[in-house]
């Protein structure tokens, strides 16, 4: 009997537990539904920021607090160079910024770029030395052309210039000395004038050759000067490049690198001047020298055809110079002999006057003595006679 009651009681309790669980679940579901409905109808008032549906332009919404702090990026110098550009260097996960000395990765980058730039400067200067030899060869080629041309003519350049001046002066003198002229004399005067014009033109051509030659020689000197300047830039670039390797500050290394680059730009300008500007001028002048030499040869042929043989005139000119020189030497010798003769005569006269004065003094002394002695003896003789 008791067992039956106990079983019924247990069943009743189990039913009550199930019912209670169902009721509680229903109540919780209703409560959640009610809260969601209430949340959708009214805004949240606990948050200080405005609702997400209406953001304010002037108000920045607060970020949720996280357990990890936000890392600040390191300050980089104002330069387009980035660490990834340095070959063989990995910067991922590394702290390359040293607050005491700077960014060693950037400093290494500037050092490598300065090294490359310095090598470019050195290569340019080496090429300029080779170009300098081309200038020297061009100058020697011009000298050879000029010497060959005047050897063919048979007269040296300097002698020919002096001869032309002399011929021009003689022709001008002859033209002025002629007064009333006959027809043949007028014709001869016209021929002289034509010859004079050809001689003047030949003088101008010779002068042009000399000026062009001087210009080329001056260009060779300019090349030497410009190469020296470029070498000075190279030395300065080398010193700055070494400084980059000795310092740690990437900012200072950046400044030194740009100085090296500035020297590189200056060396490029020197190279452009030597390789193009000045060289073009030298080549043009060398070509003009050839043209002027051709004109000189043609002018000499024209003078020869008109009766002016420059070789024969040069012989006369040299002979005249020799005669003038001989007369000058003879005149100097005559003047020297005359001066020597006058000096000897003057010396002899001076010596004779001195000896004569001494002789007069001595002879006067002895004459005085003899006179006194003679007077003394005369008195004695007179006294003896008186006795």
Image (cartoon, helix red, strand yellow):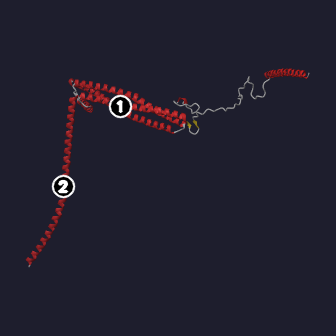
Which sits in the foreground, 229 or 67?
67
- Element type at mark 1: helix
Find residue 128 and report its horizontal and vertical position in percent: 39, 31
Kindly identify the residue that appears in the image at 44 percent across and 32 percent down. Answer: 121
- What is the crowding at mark 1: few (fewer than 14 residues within 10 Å), some, or many (at least 20)? few
Find residue 158 and report its horizontal and vertical position in percent: 27, 33
- Residue 376, by quadrant, is bottom left
Which image quadrant: the C terminus?
A: bottom left
Q: Is residue 385 left or right of residue 351?
A: left
- Residue 77, by quadrant, is top right
- Residue picked out by circle 1: 133
Kindly report which numbered mark, 2 or 1, lies closer to the viewer in this rendering: 1
Which sits in the foreground, 378 or 154?
154
- Residue 29, by quadrant, is top right
User: Whole-Å distance between the Cαs marked 2 and 1?
Assistant: 73 Å
Kindly identify the residue that appears in the image at 78 percent across and 28 percent down. Answer: 46
Q: Is residue 68 left or right of residue 376?
A: right
- Element type at mark 2: helix
Vertical side of 250 occupied by 308: above or below: above
Residue that protrudes farthest toward the bottom in the picture: 387
Vertical side of 22 occupied by 124: above or below: below
Residue that protrudes farthest toward the right in the picture: 1
Kindly identify the residue that appears in the image at 15 percent across and 67 percent down. Answer: 366
- Return the disc, 2 or 1, that comes first in the chain's sequence: 1
Mark 2 and 1 residues: CB-CB less than 8 Å, in contact? Answer: no
- What is the crowding at mark 2: few (fewer than 14 residues within 10 Å), some, or many (at least 20)? few
- Residue picked out by circle 2: 349
Q: Is residue 365 left or right of residue 49?
A: left
Find residue 109 and report its horizontal and vertical position in percent: 52, 33
């Amino acid at each position: 009997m008791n067992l039956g009651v106990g079983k019924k009681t247990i069943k009743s309790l189990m039913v009550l537990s199930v019912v209670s669980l169902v009721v509680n679940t229903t109540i919780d579901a209703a409560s959640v539904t009610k809260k969601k409905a209430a949340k959708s109808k009214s805004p949240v008032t606990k948050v200080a920021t405005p609702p997400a549906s209406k953001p304010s332009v002037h108000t920045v919404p607060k970020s949720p607090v996280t357990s990890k702090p936000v890392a600040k990026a390191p300050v980089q110098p104002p330069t387009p160079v980035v660490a990834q550009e340095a070959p063989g260097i990995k910067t991922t996960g590394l702290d390359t910024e040293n607050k005491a000395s700077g960014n060693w990765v950037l400093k290494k980058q500037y050092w490598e770029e300065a090294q490359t730039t310095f090598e470019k400067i050195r290569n340019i200067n080496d090429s300029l030395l080779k170009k300098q030899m081309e200038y020297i060869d061009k100058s020697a080629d011009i000298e050879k052309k000029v010497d060959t041309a005047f050897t063919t003519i048979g007269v040296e350049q300097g002698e020919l210039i002096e001869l032309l001046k002399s011929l021009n002066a003689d022709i001008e003198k002859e033209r002025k000395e002629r007064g009333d002229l006959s027809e043949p004399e007028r014709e001869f005067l016209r021929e002289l004038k034509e010859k004079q014009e050809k001689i003047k033109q030949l003088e101008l051509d010779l002068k042009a050759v000399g000026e062009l030659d001087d210009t080329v020689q001056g260009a060779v000197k300019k090349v030497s000067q410009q190469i020296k300047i470029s070498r000075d830039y190279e030395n300065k670039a080398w010193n700055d490049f070494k400084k980059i390797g000795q310092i740690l500050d990437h900012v200072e290394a950046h400044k030194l690198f740009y100085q090296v680059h500035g020297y590189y730009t200056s060396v490029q300008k020197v190279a452009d001047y030597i390789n193009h500007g000045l060289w073009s001028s030298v080549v043009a002048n060398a070509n003009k020298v050839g043209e002027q030499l051709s004109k000189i040869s043609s002018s000499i042929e024209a003078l020869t055809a008109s009766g002016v043989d420059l070789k024969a005139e040069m012989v006369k000119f040299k002979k005249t110079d020799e005669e003038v020189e001989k007369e000058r030497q003879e005149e100097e010798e005559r003047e020297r002999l005359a001066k020597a003769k006058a000096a000897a005569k003057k010396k002899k006269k001076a010596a004779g006057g001195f000896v004569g004065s001494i002789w007069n003094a001595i002879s006067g002394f002895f004459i005085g003595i003899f006179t006194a002695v003679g007077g003394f003896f005369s008195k004695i003789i007179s006294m003896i006679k008186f006795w």
